Amino acid sequence: MLVALVAVVAAVALAVLGDGGVLRDVEPDRLDDRLPGERPVERADIDHLRLPVAIRGYRMVDVDEVLDRLGAELAERDARIAELEAERAGAQASALSTPSLVKEPENGQAHGSHG
């Protein structure tokens, strides 16, 4: 029985370590869905991002937690920017539609010039 156990352990070790007793190189996982380079990152980009899984990599739960927080903060930032832009556009439209309090001189001449 002991001989069989040693044979099994040796076979597993040989299969894992390969020739020469060294771990074989493995192609690293690559990120398929990269963040956009041509525009700012949006919440949807973070929601759809899936990082590769690696043996000695990060814990998926931790990465997902960070991505959730980043996504929420990006959504809040984008909403605030849209709100401020709407306020600015409303203020500009209001300023353009309000009659000027300063009376323009007639015939385009400034007061006091006769010449």
Image (cartoon, grey):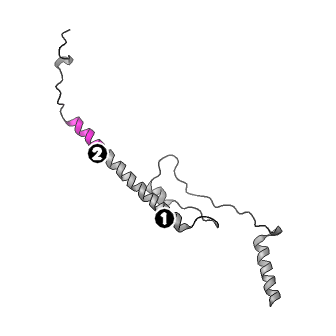
Res. 65 mark: 1
Residue placed furthest toward the bottom: 1
At 36% from the left and 48% from the top, the residue drawn is 81
| Type of the residue with mark 2 | Glu
Residue placed furthest toward the top: 115
Magenta region, residue range: 86-100
Q: Position of residue 42 (x, y in %)?
A: 45, 53
Res. 8 mark: none
- How crowded pointer 1 is (Cα within 10 Å; few <14, some 14-19, many 20+) is rated as few
Indicate which disc, 1 or 2, sits on the residue closer to the N terminus.
1
Q: Decide: marks 1, 2 in contact (CB < 8 A)?
A: no
Q: Where is residue 98 in the image (x, y as percent from the top left)?
A: 19, 36
Which quarter of the rendering shows the N terminus? bottom right
- What type of secondary structure mainly makes up the magenta span? helix
Judged by depth in the image, the label closer to the viewer, 1 or 2, is 1
On the rendered structure, is 100 left or right of 14? left
Res. 87 mark: 2
